[in-house]
Image (tube, rainbow, N blue to C red):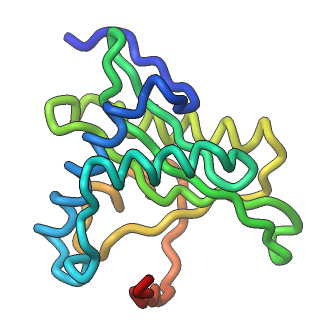
Amino acid sequence: MLGNLTIRKCDKRDESAVVKLNLNFMQEVMAENPYWTSLEIPTEEEMKNILREALTMPENILIFVGEIDGNVIGYANTWTVYSIWSRGKSLTIDDLYIALPYRKNGIGQKMMEYLMSFAKENGYRRVQLHAELNNERAHSLYRKLGFSEEEIMFFMKQIEI
């Protein structure tokens, strides 16, 4: 039996847990989708620095965590864009990840519902996301939550720094 799920904005105290979850997420996705292997998995220290930077930009990037009994078991990385077509802010859900032992318990759905409520309460006009073509679990959840499926190409180019 799972404990009580709390969903809240990520802060400094979540650093280690979110870094670990994000690194696990990257490894899982790269194993399933070869096109992501063009990205290099950052070290734990690099990921901490990336997370720290993200947390300094709440007007652009918001990270939410799901916590059970004081343990962070999932996260959602979101970003805000102003959409002319939507006539206002759009919340893009870039990553949604639940640790393997906690999956299939409705946590992803609860986090998505929380994000949609957050968007509504904060004046967002649209919530959008993308999912890999072979991620049927995600597709099923998003359809269940009323998201419409649109055909769009996603292009990616790695920029060497």
Seen at 48% across and 60% down, the residue is 94
Q: In front here: 149 or 129?
A: 129
User: Where is residue 35 drawn, in percent x and y?
Assistant: 23, 83
User: Where is residue 81 drawn, in percent x and y?
Assistant: 73, 65
Q: Quadrant of residue 139?
A: bottom left
Q: Quarter holding the C terminus?
A: bottom left
Residue 52 horizontal side relative to residue 84, left or right: left
Furthest-left residue in this view: 31
All told, the count of numbered labels is 0
Q: Quadrant of residue 117?
A: top right
Q: Quadrant of residue 9?
A: top right
User: Where is residue 73 drawn, in percent x and y?
Assistant: 30, 29
Residue 23 horizontal side relative to residue 114, left or right: left
User: Where is residue 122 drawn, in percent x and y?
Assistant: 80, 40
Position of 138 relative to 67 (above/below): below
Position of 154 relative to 135 (above/below): below
Seen at 83% across and 46% down, the residue is 123
Q: In front here: 46 or 28?
A: 46
Q: In front here: 43 or 65?
A: 43
Seen at 61% across and 45% down, the residue is 62
Seen at 53% across and 42% down, the residue is 63
Q: Quarter holding the N terminus?
A: top left
Q: In front here: 8 or 147?
A: 8
